[in-house]
């Protein structure tokens, strides 16, 4: 399901994409989903408690659903790519959450789903680069003196 913001359809595709990245925080949303997925792997490798695992799993689901709210983008292909990645991330988070009390089959399913996130999100970033000629910042923190540049310059 794609929900979202109103797009400014003026300017070149690059200008439109830069505007979307700036107003939606699209790059940071990609980065947050990546961080959340890695945090699940970390929690599992440290054999964290079921409650701690539930927390990081829920964060992945919540952040993926929030990122869906940033859609659509000015580019239909990118919108579809990101929607697929975010829907899969939300499903992986739900499976992790539901498996956190010991269901190895759900945890394995979540791990397989999360393993696909990297390539899906990389495809989306590649599409942004194709449109803009620049790699978007996927940092989840703002640099000091941030000038709202979605490419981190």
Image (spheres, grey):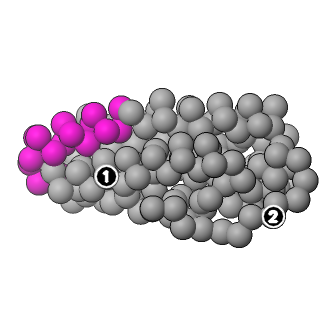
Q: Quadrant of the N terminus?
A: bottom left
Query: Mark 2: few, some, or many residues within 10 Å (few <14, many ≥20)?
Result: few
- Quick one: SS at disc 1? helix
Question: Magenta segment: does it hold 99?
Answer: no
The residue to which callout 2 is attached is 8
Q: Are discs 2 and 1 less than 8 Å apart at CB?
A: no
Q: Is residue 43 left or right of residue 100?
A: right
Quick check: 70 above or below 77? below
Percent position (x, y) of residue 55? Answer: 31, 59
Q: Is residue 96 left or right of residue 73?
A: left
Q: Which residue is pictured at 31% across the width and 47% down the height?
A: 92
Q: Which mark is residue 32?
A: none
Inspect this view and state whether residue 26 appears. yes
The residue to which callout 1 is attached is 91
Q: Residue furthest right?
A: 11
Quick check: 133 above or below 98? above
Foreground: 75 or 148? 75
Percent position (x, y) of residue 66? Answer: 50, 64
- Quick one: SS at disc 2? loop
Q: Which contiguous range is marked in magenta?
A: 100-115
The rendered magenta stretch, by its main secondary structure, is classed as helix
Q: Which residue is pictured at 71% across the width and 69% down the height?
A: 6
Q: Quadrant of the C terminus?
A: top right
Q: Which residue is pictured at 11% across the width and 54% down the height?
A: 101
Percent position (x, y) of residue 10? Answer: 88, 59
Foreground: 7 or 32? 7
Question: Magenta segment: does it hold 106?
Answer: yes
Inspect this view and state whether residue 144 appears. no
Nearest-to-viewer mark from 2 and 1: 2
Percent position (x, y) of residue 3? Answer: 54, 67
């Amino acid at each position: 399901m794609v929900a979202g913001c109103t797009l400014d359809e003026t300017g070149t595709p690059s200008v439109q994409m830069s505007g979307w990245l700036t107003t939606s925080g699209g790059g940071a949303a990609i980065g947050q989903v990546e961080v959340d997925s890695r945090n699940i792997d970390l929690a599992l490798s440290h054999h964290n408690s079921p409650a701690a695992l539930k927390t990081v799993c829920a964060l992945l689901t919540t952040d993926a659903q929030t990122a869906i709210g940033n859609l659509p983008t000015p580019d239909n292909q990118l919108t579809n790519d990101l929607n697929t990645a975010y829907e899969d991330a939300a499903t992986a988070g739900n499976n992790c959450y539901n498996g956190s009390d010991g269901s190895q089959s759900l945890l394995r399913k979540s791990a397989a789903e999360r393993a696909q996130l990297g390539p899906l999100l990389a495809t989306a970033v590649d599409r942004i680069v194709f449109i803009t000629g620049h790699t978007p910042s996927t940092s989840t923190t703002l640099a000091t003196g941030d000038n709202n540049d979605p490419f981190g310059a």
